[in-house]
Amino acid sequence: MTFEIVVVSNTPLTPHDDLDDVAFRFLRQVGYLERGAEDEKAMRESVAYRLFRDCFLLRPDKQWTVEELITAMDTSRPTVYRHLNKLKSLDILEESSLKDEGETNPRKAYRLRYGNLAKAWNFVEANVKIAMENYRKSAEHLHALCEQHIQRGTPMKQERRR
């Protein structure tokens, strides 16, 4: 799964003391929840928000099977997987296998990485750092190509057509 996060200029949410307010704002800032949605009340009641808050944030050590998440959220399998995939793309969930006694096939289970959002966030920061370093390398490469282009006096593509 490709790492994906929205990076926007923001101020820390530390002055806020309401769990729901901080969680909601944080999830919008990082791109898990839709930023342009106008109905905040509906977003707070959405499967996406409740899945993160009720299951992963408030029960961080529990390994949740998809079936448990479907039941807890009273929603469909595709909906659960859609939101799991969004959270997995942030790299804050870890996947494991659960095998109950008497079962032959293990089931996938999910929880916050390390059972702790603050520790899981270290993975996100490491991924952002790598992505930013790769952007820097690409920008430097593009600059070098431009310099070579200018030094050779190669005409712009638009001029070549004539």
Image: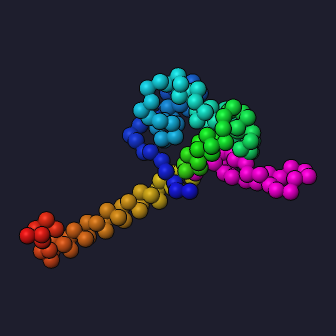
Instruction: Tell me if residue 52 comes above or below residue 127 in the rendering.
Output: above
Residue found farthest to the bottom: 152
- Closer-to-camera residue (87/119): 87
Report the front residue among 155 and 131.
155
Q: Position of residue 96 (x, y in %)?
A: 73, 53
Picture coordinates of residue 108 (x, y %)? 73, 51
Residue 160 in the figure: left or right of residue 59: left
Q: Is residue 144 above or below residue 13?
A: below
Q: Decide whether residue 60 is among the magenta residues.
A: no
Residue drawn at x 12%, y 69% as measured from the top left: 161
In-image side of 36 versus 87 (left or right): left
Q: Quadrant of the N terminus?
A: bottom right
Residue 62's spot in the image, x, y percent?
A: 75, 41
Residue at horizontal 83%, vertical 52%? 99
Return the residue found at the far left.
162
Q: How is the image coloured?
A: rainbow
Q: Residue at x 45, y 30 (%)?
A: 37
The answer to whether 8 appears left or right of 140 in the picture is right
Picture mark count:
0
From which residue to which does the magenta span run? 91-117
Residue 83 against residue 139 in the figure, above or below: above
The answer to which quarter of the image holds residue 151 is: bottom left
On the rendered image, what quadrant is the C terminus found in? bottom left
Q: Is residue 33 left or right of residue 133?
A: right
Examine the rendering and report whether any part of residue 37 can be seen: yes
* Residue 35 position in % (x across, y down): 44, 34
Asked if one can make out residue 22 in the rendered structure from this viewpoint, the answer is no
Q: Would residue 104 be counted in the magenta stretch? A: yes
